[in-house]
Amino acid sequence: MLNALRKLAAFCLSITLCLGLLAPGAGHADSPDQGDLEVIRRQAAAFMQTEQRLPELASLVSEENWTFTRNLIHGPMQEVGRQMLYINQRLDKSQRKEADKTARNLKQALAELDEAARLQDSDRLQRSYAAVTAGFEAYSQLIPSEPIS
């Protein structure tokens, strides 16, 4: 009986030690590591380059240039969804829900702008462009300016 208790105690001790060794790594799983931070920096730079095309988009919208508005959305701006996805996947878990929602709103605004240009609806085009600029601004605020190391 005493031998069985010793074996049980040794087993419990070994399980406790194993779990104790795993716990510190689990605490850091939610925060970005150095590789994640590099991906965030790279994708954020690409996102900002896309955002810098907004004045060009504004010009096309104000000229009601339906074709080139759609070309800009489907060409240079089409990667913004992928960029936000890569950033969101690597953000701290506490930031992901808001980042996902903001990214969805921006993608929806771009889709609305595309649809307005397709339908050649001037009023809808103006409203949609305002939503796109607001979406870019909102998402820019979520990107860490100096990611935590």
Image (cartoon, grey):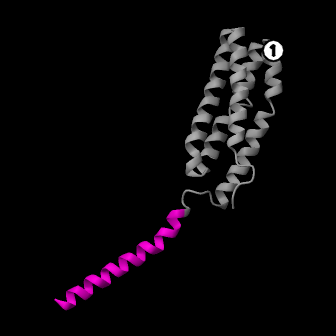
Question: Which one is nearer the viewer's eye here, 13 or 112?
Answer: 13
Secondary structure mostly seen in magenta is helix
- Label 1 neighbour load within 10 Å: few <14, some 14-19, many 20+: few
Image position, residue 55 (x, y; %): 83, 26
> Which SS class for mark 1?
helix
Please identify the quarter of the rendering in which residue 139 is found.
Answer: top right
Give the x, y percent position of residue 25: 52, 67
Magenta range is 1-27
- Answer above or below: position of 90 versus 112: below
Picture mark count:
1
The amino acid at mark 1 is Ser
Q: Which of the 4 image quarters holds residue 147?
A: bottom right
- Can you identify the residue that label 1 sits on? 62
Quarter containing the N terminus: bottom left
Identity of the residue drawn at 69% across and 61% down: 149
In depth, the one of 127 and 115 nearer the eye is: 127
Is 107 in the magenta? no
Residue at image position (62%, 57%) is 32
Q: Residue drawn at (66%, 59%), measured in percent from left and top?
A: 35
12 drawn magenta: yes
Tell me residue 44's x, y (percent).
72, 45
Q: Is residue 23 above or below residue 55?
A: below
